[in-house]
Amino acid sequence: MDTLKLDAPLTVKEPVVLVDPKLPVGTYRVQLVVQGATGKSQAADLLIKVFKE
């Protein structure tokens, strides 16, 4: 499984990724683009909130 890191594009074949456990506290926007035989999808935005427990 691949790890999603800050400011680094990630290309995976499986629809599962890990989030870098060293990300600082904050809100991050991730864009998901699916590429298939017919081309690329529009980007879908996802907000990830990292907080300290």
Image (cartoon, helix red, strand yellow):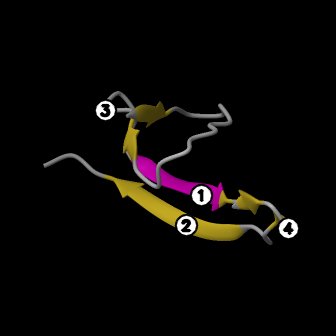
Disc marking residue 46: 2
Left or right: 51, with 38 as reference point: left
Q: Which residue is mark 3?
A: 21
Query: Tag 2's secondary structure?
Result: strand
- Looking at the rendered structure, the secondary structure element under dot 1 is strand
On the image, the x and y values in percent for residue 28 come to 53, 53
Say which of marks 1 and 4 sits in front.
4
The CA distance from mark 4 to mark 3 is 35 Å
The segment highlighted magenta reads 26-31
Q: Of helix, strand and loop, which one carries label 3?
A: loop
The residue that mark 1 highlights is 29
First in sequence: mark 2 or mark 4?
A: 4
Q: Which mark is residue 38?
A: 4
Please identify the quarter of the rendering in which residue 33 is found: bottom right
| CA separation in Å, label 2 and label 3 | 18 Å
* Residue sticking out furthest to the top: 22
Label 1 and label 3: CA atoms lie apart by 16 Å
- Between the C-alphas of marks 2 and 4, the distance is 23 Å
Tell me which amino acid carries mark 4.
Thr
The part of the image, by quadrant, that contains residue 49 is bottom left
* Mark 1–mark 3 CB contact (< 8 Å): no
Upstream in sequence: badge 1 or badge 3: 3
Query: 44 or 34: which is nearer to us?
Result: 34
- What is the number of callouts on the image? 4
Instruction: Name which residue type carries label 1.
Output: Arg
The residue positioned 40% from the left and 35% from the top of the image is 24
